[in-house]
Image (spheres, rainbow, N blue to C red):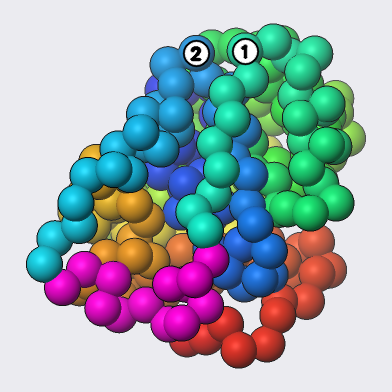
Amino acid sequence: MLNPKGGTGKTTLATNLARALGIRLGIPALLLDTDPQGTARDWQRAQSSPLEEGGEGRQVESVRTLPYPEVRGVDVPGHVRREAEAAAARAVVVIDGAAKAEAMAAEAAKVADLVLIPVQPSPADIWGASDLVRIVRAARTPAAFVVVRQVAGTRLAEDIGPALGGYGLPVFAARTAQRVAYAEALLLGRTVLDLDRAGAAAAEVLAVADEVLTVLGVAPEANTGP
Ligand SMILES: Nc1ncnc2c1ncn2[C@@H]1O[C@H](COP(=O)(O)OP(=O)(O)O)[C@@H](O)[C@H]1O
Ligand SMILES: [Mg+2]
């Protein structure tokens, strides 16, 4: 998850996607937090907070039993590959990118099988992506934009696909909408897959996960609905 701009939704997508990919593949997930701000590490610490009444009631059995993504902080670019490769045989690895850390972003882009670039439907996000696209091209790693926090039916949500097309990278069909559930889940150290009344958000995240698996040519495990 890379985007040099802060607050574009990297950590939100990274935490939710790590959980969703672990569920879809039926294997543990490792989340590498390469951001000195350590939001993913904060997220893990927040997991000790109690869930709301009735929370987790919606989970399918495979979600209930799979452990949460393990979060590891990586503070040196040279350690990204070591951490990722050490876990790759047993876990799906998601790297949460840093803002304004070019060396770290370049290393993460080199190590990854796929770079996802979360962008909000705003001109600032579209223009801000040009440096990153250069980094990703240099790494020769497949990459795609993922539109996040869209407000469906707005001009911005409709225009962002064509606007991003100028960068020559694919844009995921799966998008996330602007929903309170994402912020709530982050605050609770959970994901939208674990919150009751967050079914629409959960479906979005699973759709992004499935598109990742399709792009990578990996088949999800059976029986991990919905
Ligand atoms: N789809 C969404 N709907 C609502 N809020 C979101 C969504 N995605 C991210 N946010 C909120 O936006 C803020 C920044 O997101 P974050 O994932 O921390 O960005 P980054 O890691 O790129 O700095 C957080 O407060 C988060 O809760
Ligand atoms: Mg972050």
Do residues under tags 1 and 2 come within 8 Å of each other at their CB atoms?
Answer: yes
Q: Which residues are magenta?
A: 54-66
Mark carried by residue 36: 2
Q: Residue at x 53, y 66 (%)?
A: 66
Q: Position of residue 225 (x, y in %)?
A: 52, 85
Classify 11 as above or below 198.
above
Q: Residue at x 52, y 20 (%)?
A: 35
Q: Quadrant of residue 121?
A: top left
Q: Position of residue 29 (x, y in %)?
A: 63, 52
Q: Residue at x 63, y 44 (%)?
A: 30
Q: Main secondary structure of the magenta part?
A: loop
Classify 70 as above or below 54.
above
Classify 40 as above or below 222.
above
Q: Is residue 224 left or right of residue 5?
A: right
Badge 2, how many Cα within 10 Å: few under 14, some, many 20+? some
Of residues 99 and 38, the one drawn nearer to the viewer in this rendering: 38
Q: Is residue 156 left or right of residue 10?
A: left
How many numbered marks have been drawn onto this rendered protein structure? Answer: 2
Mark carried by residue 44: none
Q: Is 136 colored magenta in this rendering?
A: no
- The residue pinned by badge 1 equals 75
Q: For the residue with label 2, is its CB less than 8 Å from the closest atom of ligand 2?
A: no
Q: Quadrant of residue 80?
A: top right
Q: Amino acid at mark 1?
A: Asp
Q: Is residue 46 left or right of residue 172?
A: left
Q: Amino acid at mark 2?
A: Pro
Q: Is residue 103 visible?
A: yes
Answer with mark 1 or mark 2, whichever residue precedes in sequence.
2
Q: Position of residue 177 (x, y in %)?
A: 32, 59
Q: Is 58 colored magenta in this rendering?
A: yes
Q: Residue at x 61, y 62 (%)?
A: 22
